[in-house]
């Protein structure tokens, strides 16, 4: 499964603690699903992804939205969100 971080939720100091992603019931998301967070950059017309953190779905809020707890990379995720950079989330429990 693949999704995007659509909004930051709670923060603590300089770290992102929770985020919302555009993945929900309609795509088969479930509470407890672990996901990797990738920063996406364009290099020579191609997408380059680098892993910056991990998430866990805490609550599936609707057909296309879930709230996730940031398990690692909170500092990098917060910096990317503030800079308006694209962050892609991919499941790892499959």
Image (cartoon, rainbow, N blue to C red):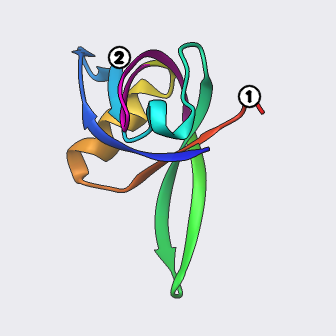
Q: Earlier in the sequence, mark 2 or mark 1?
A: 2
Callout 2 touching callout 1 (CB < 8 Å): no
The quadrant in which the C terminus is found is top right
Name the residue furthest bottom. 44
Residue 58 inside the magenta-drawn segment: yes
At 37% from the left and 56% from the top, the residue drawn is: 86
| Residues packed near mark 2 inside 10 Å, few (<14), some (14 to 19) or many (20 plus) | many
> Is residue 43 placed above or below 80 in the rendered structure?
below
Whether 94 is drawn above or below 89: the answer is above
- Left or right? Give the position of 68 relative to 55: left
User: Residues under labels 2 and 1: Cα distance?
Assistant: 21 Å
Q: Which residue is mark 1?
A: 93
Q: Left or right of 6: which side holds 39?
A: right
Q: Main secondary structure of the magenta part?
A: strand
Q: Is residue 4 above or below residue 13?
A: below
The image quadrant that residue 91 belongs to is top right
Residue 81 in percent (x, y) is at: 28, 43
Which segment is the magenta one? 53-68
Residue at 47 percent of width and 66 percent of height: 41
For the point 59% across and 13% down, the residue is 32
Q: Please indicate whether residue 1 sits to the left or right of residue 57 in the image.
A: right
What kind of element bears circle 2?
Answer: loop
Residue 37: x, y in percent? 53, 40
Looking at the image, which is closer to me, 1 or 70?
A: 1
The local crowd at label 1, few if under 14, some if 14 to 19, many if 20 or more residues have their Cα within 10 Å, is: few
Query: In x, y percent, where is residue 93?
Result: 74, 28
Q: Which mark is residue 17?
A: 2
Disc 1 element: loop
Nearest to the observer: residue 9 or residue 50: 9
């Amino acid at each position: 499964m693949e999704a995007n971080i659509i909004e930051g939720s709670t923060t603590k100091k300089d770290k992102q603690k929770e985020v919302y992603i555009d993945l929900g019931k309609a795509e088969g998301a479930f509470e407890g699903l672990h996901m990797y967070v990738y920063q996406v950059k364009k290099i020579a017309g191609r997408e380059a992804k680098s892993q910056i953190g991990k998430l866990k779905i805490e609550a599936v809020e609707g057909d296309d939205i879930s709230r996730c707890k940031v398990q690692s990379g909170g500092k990098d995720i917060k910096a990317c969100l503030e800079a308006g950079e694209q962050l892609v989330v991919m499941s790892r429990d499959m």
